């Protein structure tokens, strides 16, 4: 078991890039095939994965340079911080869905800046419902997409921190 964890930590940039790509693919699949339009906070969560993917790709490319091994831990630490931001966004989003605190006023079911009637008039009477950050569109095992994102982001934060410690101790 420890050798498996060590193998993951040795190639953490690849795992972080793959995880980011997988989370973005899942989000786009929910949107494209499931018909779930993303709210403002959903789009913020995606930005975290785009940034993490870019940092992981940079880490993979820098890894090929001579004497780059001593800088690997900085990329892992940066990934830990980025994924920690993702945890914050996801927890904030989940809390807004559970009505523990208000969501952004531009993205709540009660504070839309365009009325439903005005939107219907614009679309020629088509009935639409814009996404709201404070309403979960989908739940699985009691958790919304934002809740699952919080757990996954927390796991990615922990692995990134472990990889940073692991790489920092290596000669």
Image (spheres, rainbow, N blue to C red):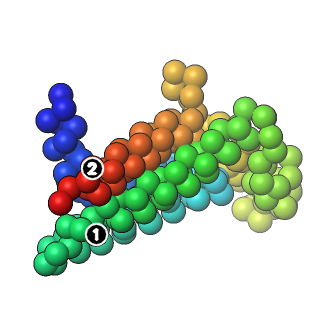
Q: Quadrant of residue 73?
A: bottom left
> Seen in the image, is 73 located left or right of residue 105?
left
Residue 19, x across and y down, in percent:
33, 49
> Seen in the image, is 99 located left or right of residue 136?
right
Residue 153, x across and y down, in percent:
47, 45
Q: CA distance from mark 2 to mark 1?
A: 12 Å
User: Crowding at label 1, few (<14), some or many (≥20) Cα neighbours within 10 Å?
Assistant: some
The N terminus appears in which quarter of the rendering? top left
Q: Residue furthest top?
A: 141
Residue 152, x across and y down, in percent:
44, 40
Q: Nearer the viewer, residue 19 or 167?
A: 167
Residue 145, x across and y down, in percent:
54, 38
Is residue 22 visible from the viewing direction of this image? no
Q: Residue at x 55, y 46 (%)?
A: 87
Q: Secondary structure at mark 1?
A: helix
Say if 54 sits above or below 37 in the image.
below
| 2 or 1: tag closer to the N-terminus | 1
User: Crowding at label 2, few (<14), some or many (≥20) Cα neighbours within 10 Å?
Assistant: some
> Seen in the image, is 5 located left or right of residue 100?
left
The C terminus appears in which quarter of the rendering? bottom left
Find disc 1 in the rendering and name its residue.
71
Q: Residue at x 86, y 46 (%)?
A: 110
Find disc 2 in the rendering and name its residue.
166
Q: Residue at x 27, y 49 (%)?
A: 166
């Amino acid at each position: 078991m420890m050798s498996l964890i060590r193998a993951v930590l040795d190639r953490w940039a690849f795992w972080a890039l793959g995880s980011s790509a997988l989370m973005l693919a899942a989000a786009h699949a929910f949107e494209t095939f499931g018909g779930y339009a993303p709210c403002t906070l959903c789009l913020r969560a995606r930005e975290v994965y785009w940034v993490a993917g870019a940092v992981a790709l940079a880490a993979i490319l820098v890894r090929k340079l001579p004497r780059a091994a001593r800088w690997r831990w900085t990329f892992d630490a940066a990934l830990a911080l980025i994924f920690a931001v993702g945890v914050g966004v996801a927890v904030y989003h989940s809390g807004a869905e559970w009505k523990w605190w208000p969501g952004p006023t531009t993205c709540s079911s009660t504070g839309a800046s365009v009325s439903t009637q005005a939107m219907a008039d614009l679309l020629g009477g088509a009935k639409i419902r814009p996404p709201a950050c404070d309403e979960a569109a989908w739940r699985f095992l009691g958790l919304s997409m934002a809740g699952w994102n919080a757990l996954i982001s927390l796991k990615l934060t922990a692995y990134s921190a472990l990889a940073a410690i692991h790489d920092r101790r290596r000669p």
